[in-house]
Image (spheres, helix red, strand yellow):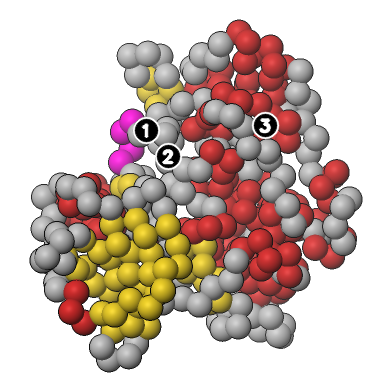
Amino acid sequence: MDYDHNNILISVSKVYADVNQQKGPEWYDHKSYEPQWNLPDNYSLIKKVGRGKYSTVFKAVHKRRTECAIKILVPLDPKRYLREIKILTNLAGQKNIVRLLDLVKDPMTGIYSFVFEWVDFYDWRSLYTSFTIHDIRLYMYKLLCALDTAHSLGIMHRDIKPQNIAIDKEHRRLRLLDWGLADFYHPKQKYNSHVATRVFKPPELLICYPYYDYSMDIWSAGLTFSIMMFKRIVIECGEDDPDQLLKVADLVGGAGILNYADSLGVDLDDSTRQQLVRRPGTGWEKHRAKVAPELCPPDALDLLNRMMTIDHRERITARDAMKHAFFKPLLDPLKTHKVE
């Protein structure tokens, strides 16, 4: 086992660890990437559909009358967006991942925009409330497929949450959106823990462990899975990352988190340690009791536990999750609820 100069254990992903090394700098070196920016003349905005910290998203139409989504970026140095562009370009044409169609720059304002395929999608709150176990099975499989594809190409999404998963229930389509926090995985590289949305952060980020890997996406996808099943967010939002760690402990238990941090060589302050010890964890039973039994069968709970394992080194991979018994009805040719 390798340790850094702070005696922190350097863990390496158990899957796809060397993908970027094998593909070479041309694949992952976004800093020297030079994208082609086109004129915006081909597009007309229809209506605003979303807004974030660094962008505003509009539904638009191409002059050929095809619908699209245009993400107008906050005026910043375009180099700030090179990693996202390179990742989206590398993911072009992959199933269940939003497709980047064009890059445009307005010569009058100097504002940059991304053009994506348009996906008709529903508000996730009302959508998840309506999900049957068959819906949950289908869309979780598609999400895991998207994640395994990205991971197999050396890419961590780092912001999995319902808001970044567009689902068109009418056409049974899913697209994984918003790759703005995504990054290329290199073994033994330190990564910033200030990524992902707080509620969806896995334990490794909440204890500021820098050598995380693709498995962080699996925890966040697991929490999304739990929302689909239990029709509510099962982990409360903390005031900051240390408080969020305690909220996670309320579910999974503080002793396991303490053992995990100690095994990595991560020091937690005395106050945090004392508070973790006092949290045995509720588990899933109280949430399971509030919904119909058919929404959370034993194999679904087993998969959920494997996805939300505290220790990232023991968490199930996206590829193995797709082979889980929970998805057997989708893959059985005699069943009607199949993956399309």
Query: Considering the image in quadrants, where does the N terminus appear?
Result: top left
Magenta-span inclusion, residue 300: no
Q: Residue at x 33, y 47 (%)?
A: 183
Distance from label 1 to label 2 (Cα)? 7 Å
Residue density around tag 3, few if under 14, some if 14–19, many if 20 or more, within 10 Å: many
Q: Quick one: which residue is furthest to the bottom in this view?
A: 64
The residue tagged with tag 1: helix, strand or loop?
loop
Residues rendered magenta in the picture:
186-190
- Please state the horizontal and vertical placement of residue 57, each as a whole percent of the image: 38, 64
Residue 192's disc is 1
Q: Residue at x 31, y 33 (%)?
A: 189
Q: Quick one: which residue is furthest to the top in this view?
A: 270
Q: Is residue 232 above or below residue 10?
A: below
Q: Nearer the viewer, residue 114 or 2?
A: 114
Distance from label 1 to label 3 (Cα)? 21 Å
- Please state the horizontal and vertical placement of residue 115, each as a whole percent of the image: 29, 71
Residue 247's disc is 3
Residue 97 appears left or right of 219: left
Q: Are marks 1 and 2 in contact (CB under 8 Å)?
A: yes
Q: Is residue 232 above or below residue 333?
A: above
Residue 172 shows in this picture: yes
Residue holding disc 2? 195
Residue 142 lies in what quarter of the image? bottom right
Check disc 2 and give the amino acid type: Val
